[in-house]
């Protein structure tokens, strides 16, 4: 009888060890799942800093969007010095502005003033300074986030965003060749870069929980269309009831570029 009990105990212990060994954990994003993980998210290494970079003002009048940029460390059109080390898509035109209107894909602009069509109505506008490889500068001075009323291609009323908000930035568009190996995930938090808020990144149905505001490399994306949905969550894991939350974007991976 003692031998039978010993045998049963060993079988239970082996089953327990097997279950623990088979559990998949995405430690870098703070999430775990017993299902096989398709996509790997790895935090970026530290990027070139711009301590005095500032987006001091922005305006929209007569169809022209204009900004005032201050600071000696950041210049539009320059290549960010650590771009070769990042191994992700980089703009040949250099550092630029990202302008986001509501949940629309951002427009990249390399001059401080530019023509832009914004429909009449109320909109949430975010403008921030970007490195040449499209990573946002995540400092209070480097962005402006406002709720604005637009009429006849001019802002008639504008107020700073007071509550927490999440804006989608990258990835977007089409990625080809080497740019498909490591695709940068980057988003912008307004009044939400503090304990208690987290971001859920749903990548083609696979969920990753991000508890630190930073860019990530995504590896393992398949050929064709891919969709990412970003959700701002509270400390209990519930969707925060704020405008434009969640937000999603579909982009394309072409490991072998299509022939012209």
Image (tube, rainbow, N blue to C red):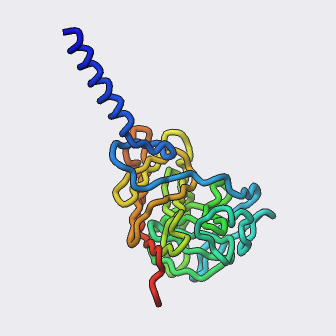
Q: Residue at x 72, y 58 (%)?
A: 48
Q: Position of residue 141 (x, y in %)?
A: 68, 57
Q: Tell whether 10 sits left or right of 233.
A: left
Q: Nearer the viewer, residue 182 or 106?
A: 182
Q: Tell whether 4 sits left or right of 226.
A: left
Q: Residue at x 52, y 81 (%)?
A: 117
Q: Residue at x 59, y 78 (%)?
A: 61
Q: Tell whether 109 sits left or right of 49.
A: left
Does residue 43 lie above or below 30 as drawn? below
Does residue 159 lie above or below 97 as drawn? above
Count of marks, rendered view: 0
Given the current orientation, which residue lies at the most extreme left position?
1
Q: Nearer the viewer, residue 148 or 178?
A: 178
Location of the N terminus by quadrant is top left
Q: Residue at x 51, y 45 (%)?
A: 28
Given the current orientation, which residue lies at the most extreme top position?
2
Q: Position of residue 160 (x, y in %)?
A: 57, 58
Given the current orientation, which residue lies at the most extreme bottom position?
260
Q: Position of residue 110 (x, y in %)?
A: 66, 76
């Amino acid at each position: 009888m003692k031998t039978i009990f010993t045998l049963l105990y060993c079988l239970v212990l082996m089953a327990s060890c097997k279950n623990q060994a088979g559990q998949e954990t995405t430690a870098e994003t703070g999430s775990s799942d017993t299902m096989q993980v398709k996509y790997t998210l790895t935090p970026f290494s530290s990027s070139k800093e711009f301590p005095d970079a500032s987006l001091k003002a922005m305006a929209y009048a007569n169809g022209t969007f204009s900004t005032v940029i201050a600071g000696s460390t950041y210049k539009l059109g320059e290549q960010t010095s650590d771009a070769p080390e990042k191994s992700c898509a980089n703009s040949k035109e250099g550092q630029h502005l990202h302008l986001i209107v509501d949940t629309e894909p951002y427009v990249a602009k390399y001059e401080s003033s530019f023509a832009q069509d914004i429909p009449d109505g109320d909109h949430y506008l975010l403008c921030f300074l970007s490195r040449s490889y499209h990573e946002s500068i995540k400092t209070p001075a480097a962005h402006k986030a406002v709720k604005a009323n637009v009429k006849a291609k001019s802002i008639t009323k504008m107020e700073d965003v007071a509550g927490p908000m999440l804006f989608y930035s990258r990835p977007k568009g089409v990625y080809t060749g080497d740019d498909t190996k490591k695709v940068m995930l980057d988003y912008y938090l307004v009044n939400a870069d503090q304990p208690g808020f987290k971001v859920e990144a749903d990548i083609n149905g696979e969920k990753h929980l991000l508890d630190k505001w930073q860019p990530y490399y995504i590896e393992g994306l398949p050929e064709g269309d891919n969709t990412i949905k970003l959700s701002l969550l509270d400390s209990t894991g519930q969707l925060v009831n704020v405008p434009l939350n969640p937000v999603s974007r579909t982009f394309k991976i072409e490991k072998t570029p299509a022939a012209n």
